[in-house]
Amino acid sequence: MRRVTPRIAVGPLQPAYAVAAVEAGGGQVVNPDGKADGLIWLAPRQVDALHDALEATGARWVQLPLAGVERFHEAGLFSAGPQWTSAKGSYAEPVAEHAVMLALAGLRVLPTRITATSWGKPDGISLYDRDVVILGAGGITAELLRLLAPWRVRATVVRRRPDPVEGAAATVGLERLDEVLAPAQVVFLALALTPQTRGVIAAPQLAAMRPDAWLVNVARGPHVDTDALVAALDSGAIGGAALDVTDPEPLPDGHPLWGRANCIITPHTADTQAMVEPLLARRISTNVRRFAAGEQLEGLVDIEAGY
Amino acid sequence: MRRVTPRIAVGPLQPAYAVAAVEAGGGQVVNPDGKADGLIWLAPRQVDALHDALEATGARWVQLPLAGVERFHEAGLFSAGPQWTSAKGSYAEPVAEHAVMLALAGLRVLPTRITATSWGKPDGISLYDRDVVILGAGGITAELLRLLAPWRVRATVVRRRPDPVEGAAATVGLERLDEVLAPAQVVFLALALTPQTRGVIAAPQLAAMRPDAWLVNVARGPHVDTDALVAALDSGAIGGAALDVTDPEPLPDGHPLWGRANCIITPHTADTQAMVEPLLARRISTNVRRFAAGEQLEGLVDIEAGY
């Protein structure tokens, strides 16, 4: 029989926002080294310690702190018994905002402006009434479509299965990616990293893009073949790339992507800790309450798909 | 009796888009050195030549190519007989887009990112659910409110007369500017330049702003007291300034606003010629059609107010 007040382990540390969120959801906070019903795991890189916490707590539910959980998937954790939930969808707003900012800054040649020390010449492309392509159909894409709606963009969403997406002019399967890239002024990457989506933007895709199109990546660095991207930027095959994620990441000093007029790099900062905490807290308290009530959890990881 | 096909002088040059727009509106294009019913004047700096064209054509209506017509006002042209229309409202979309881009780029520390040659630390402020202040209540403000609506900003519009503005949480008169600045994350300048609005942002207003607020100017340089702005940026009184217009303009080489992490300068390029031509063409053909039909023209200049 389900307890009214579930014991929720929080670890490896117990920041105040997470403790408050568990309590707001009706849970009792415990340490991750003893028995617990659920486990809120806040360290995105500590896979081994999570393994230990899973064994110690015997938790039937684990909440992860990120939307992109490929690290846990690759470590084989998702084959274990508990239900897994991620933060997917909950950071959509700041990430979509960052994507819009990167697209507009690229189209309006901000690297040239910001490095100028002299008045320049008019230049720039407006986003109104343009075609855009968005890879992925999760929370970021939904929010991106909402933010871009006033610009009257015609958005084509590319996803695994071509089920229609609200607010998109068209939705197609990943196998049709190359043919839909041609008219896009901006190509946004907002999809999960899986073996199928690694390198989804490589030389053929870059060649299919408009010479004035910008590529905006707020997903994961390995979605893009970095060598092919550098070649495309060198040759002018595309207008530019604005990347919040890179491969390798962090981008090493001296890498050819630094310091270019046709490339904007932000250091994986679409969603800062300050932006994320209130959103993760909301996800945690919702899921603690649902877990206690035996209801379906938010952000359930699809174990097969790996995200 | 009004002619069915009005004679519309186009000058000083007759670019194809303007000729096509006059003809689309049902007008006959003539040169500006002989009699004409209307005059489309496309040279924003040639005030004397416009004076000559006015005399030669005897035009009863003059269409100007800009939204900001203070140069013509200051030259005393608006006291003459014809109806005057400007481009006001018609370039609102690209200018509002540029303002959104500047605000997001500032809040997300893009000058630091773009000049980096090394991976940086997370930083930045999100615009969701923030207070903003917009000075002016014309077409740019209406469009800015439309673009910002998905961000759920609480917008206070500051204008000459505090008539309510659709989409704004509050509208106040210019005399209440200082008191509404305090909570604003972004202060947008989108107002006309008149003797009353020259220097509307000076030391007291900058002091009233949040230390993390950004000032975005897409109106006219002299709205801002440049020396006071430099002092505010030096002392960290505000988060930063993103300026598409400056005073002086062009901003001279070596000016202290160049090359700062807390300042973005774009060279009066919110609306490039390529963005503007189709919008001005639409204004021209609409007004030629309305002029021929004796209907009220779009973008009528308020002779008293000077815009």
Image (tube, coloured by chain):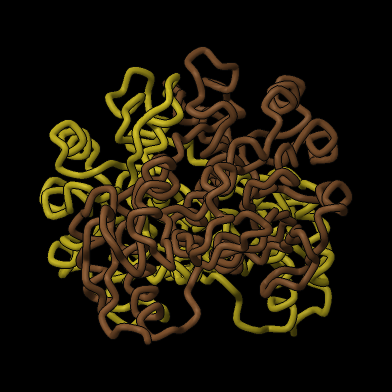
Chain colours: A yellow, B brown
Residue A276 or residue B59, whichever sits in front: B59
Using the rendered view, name the quadrant where residue A165 is placed.
bottom left
User: In the rendered image, which quarter is residue B17 located in?
Assistant: bottom left
Q: If the image is split into quadrants, where does the C terminus of chain A sit?
A: bottom left
| Residue A85 visible, this angle | no
Is B109 left, or right, of A167 in this rendering?
A: right
Asked if residue B94 lies left or right of residue B232, the reply is left
Residue positioned 74% across, 59% down in the render:
B159
User: What is the x, y in percent for residue B135?
Assistant: 70, 53
Q: Residue at x 67, y 57 (%)?
A: B305
Quadrant location of the N terminus of chain A in the rendered image: bottom right
- Residue B284's spot in the image, x, y percent? 35, 68
Is residue B74 shown above or below A119? below
Relative vertical location of residue B6 with respect to residue B57 in this rendering, above or below: below
Tell me if B89 is positioned left or right of B231 in this view: left
In the image: residue A167, left or right of residue A55: left
**At 69% across and 76% down in the image, what residue appears?**
A291
Residue A237 lies, with reference to residue B229, above or below; the image says: below
**Foreground: A247 or A70?**
A247
| Total numbered labels placed on residues in the image | 0
Comparing B123 with B300, the one in front is B300
Q: Residue furthest top?
A: B254
- Horizontal and vertical percent position of residue A214: 29, 48
